Image: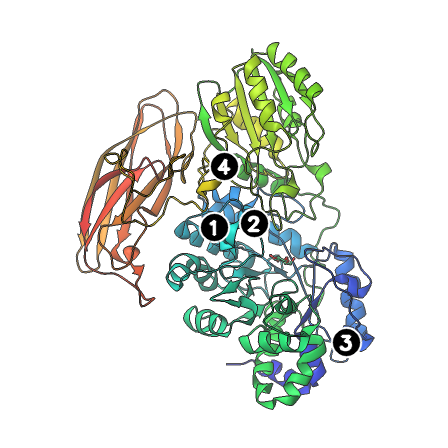
Amino acid sequence: MKDKHLVELLKEMTLAEKVGQLVQLTPDFFAQGGEITGPMQQWQMSEAQSYQIGSVLGTHTAEQVYTIQKQYLEKSRLKIPLVFMADVIHGYETIFPIPLAMAASFDEHLIEKAAKLAAKEAAEAGIHVTFSPMADYVKDARWGRVLESNGEDPTLSSVLTAAYVRGYQGATNNLNKDKKRIAACVKHFVGYGAAEGGRDYNTVDLSDLEIYQNYLPAFKAAIDAGAALVMTSFNTVRGIPATANQPLIQDVLRKKLGFEGLVISDWAAVAELIAHRVAADGEEAAKKAFHAGIEMDMMSDCYMNSLAQIITAAPELQQQLDQAVYHVLKLKDRLGLFDDPYRGLNEADLSVHLDTDTRLSTREAAEKTAVLLKNEDILPLSKNQKIALIGPKADSKDIFGAWSWIGKQEDAVSLKEGLSEKHLDLSVLSYAEEEVLSDHYIEEACKLAEQSDVVLLAVGESSEESGEAASLTKLTLSRRQDVLVQEIAKHNPNVVLILFNGRPLVLSDIEESCKAILIGWFPGSEGGHALANLLTGTVEPQGRLPMSFPRSVGQLPLTYGQLSTGRPKTPDNQDQKYISRYMDEENDALYPFGFGLGYGSCEIEQTTITHISEEEGLYEVNARLINHTEKAHRTLLQLYSQDLVTEVARPIRELKQWRKVLVPAKSSIDITFNISETQFAYVHSDLLLKNDPGKIALYIGFDSKQADKIGEIAI
Ligand code: BGC
């Protein structure tokens, strides 16, 4: 049912006004600087056209939003408020760890809370819609945008993607009432993470089976959670760019996933149909994108310049145009913009800069997302040690990572600042970021290492090295940071590597030089405090890898959930030639999905599987966790499955459920997973998700590799 007042409004609109609603531009078109996240083109726009557009993206301040909206409402005939959108990806002004790190928490509640806090800050700056969450399935760390993802597991990603939507929009999705929430735009529909060679914007060629099984679930989860918008991706799907792909948008997104909101292109993607060479000019690009179902044209002039002519020449498209404009108006209505075009701005308390509770939440998030990959009895640090802190990240404030454009680096807490509050015997030798390490620095660092008991080596990526348009062919430490690690280890074996990174890196050449490795990711505003708490043991590391760390770039794309092959490598056939393996490298990851250490330990005992309801196909899986030590330990118990015989090739192992558990010292805890047969449904060759009878093996463990088989069920 369409809202009557919107239908009435639609009737009053001229063709040019309708087309205008489908155009989104940066604030530059209103003589205001904005966030630039793609190529800029100059195009001519009349004043009348600029007061007809529907949306602005990438404003920086509340004042900017206020000025543009006010000017627009004064000058536009129908006074339909602009909807302001922006990339609020991991916080707005107060910065949370990057999404890949957040996924390491395996904690939907943490993510929902972070999204809620980000929404509040953004809403108070006049933002109505965030271009988040990114639901892209990923398994290639060369692609810099893995930073924005939830990692390599479709089930984990679905759960977390839905949590982002709930956090941004509120569980009741009542954006009209709740002005501290914003609408979510899930992206990039679909397949973007499969860019060939991990090169951003490159060709994608995926089977339908793969798309349905791995790429759609997180989008479905976001849509089921009520995501208001979907952004299409830059890449091709079955040869046709998503922006011009009618079957993809109409049959898959609209019909199969039941999406009823607004479909927006990615930045300039409509015009880029010309570069893809599937459109000869802007008019053809507009025609193809519009036919496909793109409703809002982000940052290209194709709709603005050609859509009116296209509709005039083909009046049968009028209804589709009205439908698209209706979706824009409906979004504005849902957000309450017709009643309050300055939504959020009035609620803002501009005297509060960086709310303390939000900062503390980013610290909590950073503490819960760092992953300890190795620890040979060296962490946590103790007070009586002489500690050297060395490396380009030692005192760096470049710890936000990509997509943190509003956050100010001066508000970040560096590792040095965090550690200085811990009353340690600490000497610091930092180095300018983004510069290749000099021989002189490495020599000085080695001298300091020699005089110390423990060396904290803070290294990693700069913000520019991960994210959009940051594809890499080498994933080892850059700028001679690997040389620094190896040289230091020659002078002091007690090396603790602290990594700041936006993607899995290849650590094969340096891991042996380190006694401990802590993955801090880009940890956000309170990174230094969080890492200091982790290193000194105030907090136990509890992050688990959401994406495998490869041994070598040559293994990519890599996932723990690879399909079974006809010639699998097994412990018994290592000496044979004709099996699926590399001659110069292992098949598996150096650190697998789900892996991470804490400072304590526990064991799994007494696992049972009970068939509790035949009719409903329900099972209960029980496991007892025993902590024999004197220290409480927090861990992530993971339940995996393998369907033994299937119609299409299936992953060797699939994560089904997980649970964070605190096992007190010298005690045990019983954990129950309730599992239903429907969780073993898989996409068949007819692209339908269904169960078929057969046996399923279940595994329980602390990561995807070490999980032990606990039995089989027959469904
Ligand atoms: C990115 C999107 C982003 C958009 C707007 C594009 O370059 O691919 O993820 O939301 O810019 O900033």
Image location (x, y in percent) of residue 214? 40, 56
How far apart are labels 4 and 2 at the CA level? 22 Å
Which numbered disc, 1 or 4, marks the residue that appears first in the sequence? Answer: 1
First in sequence, mark 4 or 2: give its number: 2
Mark 4 element type: helix
Secondary structure under the numbered disc 1 in the rendered image: loop
Lower sequence index among marks 2 and 1: 1
Q: Which residue is identified by label 4?
A: 368
Residue, disc 1: 138
Which of the two marks, 1 or 4, is nearer to us in this view?
1
Spatial separation of the CA atoms under disc 2 and disc 1? 9 Å
Give, as a three-letter code, the residue at label 1.
Answer: Val
> How packed is label 3: few (under 14 Cα within 10 Å), some, or many (20 or more)?
some
N-terminal of the pair, mark 2 or mark 3, is 3
Q: Nearer the viewer, residue 672 or 282?
A: 282
Residue on which the image places disc 3: 49
| Vertical placement of residue 339 versus 67, above or below | below
Label 2–label 3 contact, CB within 8 A = no
Ligand 1 within 8 Å, label 2 CB:
yes
